[in-house]
Amino acid sequence: MVRNGQDIWEDGSREHHGGAEPFLFSSESVGEGHPDKLCDQISDAVLDAHLKQDPHSKVACETVTKNGKILVCGEITSSSKVDYDTVVRNVLKHVGYDDIQKGIDCKSCEIELAIDEQNPEIANGVHKDKHEEDIGAGDQVFRALQGLMFGYASDETEECMPLTIMLAHKLNSRLAELRRNGTFPWAGPDTKSQVTCEYVFEHGATVPLRVHTVVISTQHTDDITLDLLREEVMNQVILEVIPKQYLDDQTIYYINPCGRFVVGGPMADAGLTGRKIIVDTYGGWGAHGGGAFSGKDPTKVDRSAAYAARWVAKSLVAAGLCRRCLVQLSYAIGIAEPLSISIFSYGTSDKSTKELLQIVKKNFDLRPGKIIKELKLQTPFYQKTCVYGHFGRPEFPWEVPKTLIL
């Protein structure tokens, strides 16, 4: 049969785009109640609480959770007066952890704090007594400098994001929506998804052909059968989220493949801020410098420069200058100007790498202070960023392509 311009033969093989050989690529996402993602949300809620009162707060906040206990720790310098207990419990309540049977109870959990002020040596080198645009590249730990960040974009979706990670995020988001509106009264907050797509390279660009495999694991109450759960997830989640043109009779579905999933959240697994960095970014596409985002104020280039790198990459793709783009930035602590800017277009641009780099330098000031100002990064919106991906969501400033002067 013929589908989307692909000739599909009886043995399942394909010819597409001049006989280019297809390949498989997978990306995963996690839901709001996943223990690591819960910690990300708490750390970013603490950051937001400080920024609401003091936009110049310096925050490096980590969270750990297990067995009804939550530890919030780190270095914070701020004039804000924050009720940490209330912040933490509000996050738990919002996520849906209001009963110990779900994994942790927002009303009765034990909360411990271990928070100091920012190291004064870092403060002096990064931001103290400096003009805003000359703020140096900050990192929350003096002995563990993180100097490189990546941004990625691809024209395979409207969001200029890889299809695999966008679908994985949307599956988890749909599960949460149906849990909250009462359609899935049996659903718990702890969920995971994974999507494998079949791709082909088209002159360096990545073109998705079909969805090869979908995996969903969702926490549930003890009173629903696996058969009913699988039927409802298939009909109301998978078939509602994934465009029909990507599904065929060869697509494989695994819904709670391990069986029952009643015990979840921090009761089942320990959680820690910053352990879902690939989920947070591009699902394994592009590259990653290793630095996590959540709990860090925007003077930390782990976060702000990664957002800026995405802004640059998406702007180049949206302008039609390339179909696929990877941007690397590198910084040294206390130095405002990036040490290096690198552009990779995978052969999808009519312009040379040198020409693309000139366009970037002409249009973007990538000093941390200027990034903070242009992307409005002192806005307390960080708790919203850390579920369902930091990229590919139009409500954030770094997702609005810049009109480029060529």
Image: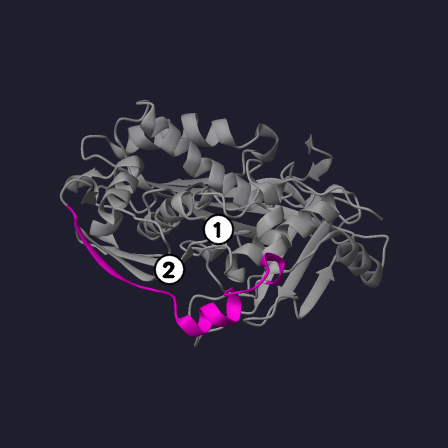
Residue flagged by tag 2: what amino acid is it?
A: Thr
Render colour scheme: one colour
- Helix, strand or loop under label 2: strand
Q: Quadrant of residue 116?
A: bottom left
On-image quarter of the N terminus: top right
**In front: 64, or 210?**
64
Asked whether, in this view, residue 71 is left or right of residue 360, the answer is left
Task: Please name the residue shown 20% across and 45% down the image.
Answer: 104
User: Label 1 neighbourhood size at 10 Å, few (<14), some (14-19), many (20+)?
Assistant: many
**In the rendering, which numbered label is found on residue 280?**
1
Q: Nearer the viewer, mark 2 or mark 1?
A: 2
- Helix, strand or loop under label 1: helix
Q: Position of residue 19 (x, y in %)?
A: 77, 49
Q: Position of residue 208 (x, y in %)?
A: 65, 43
Q: CA distance from mark 2 to mark 1?
A: 26 Å
Task: Please name the residue shown 55% across and 51% down the image.
Answer: 282
Asked whether, in this view, residue 151 is left or right of residue 167, the answer is right
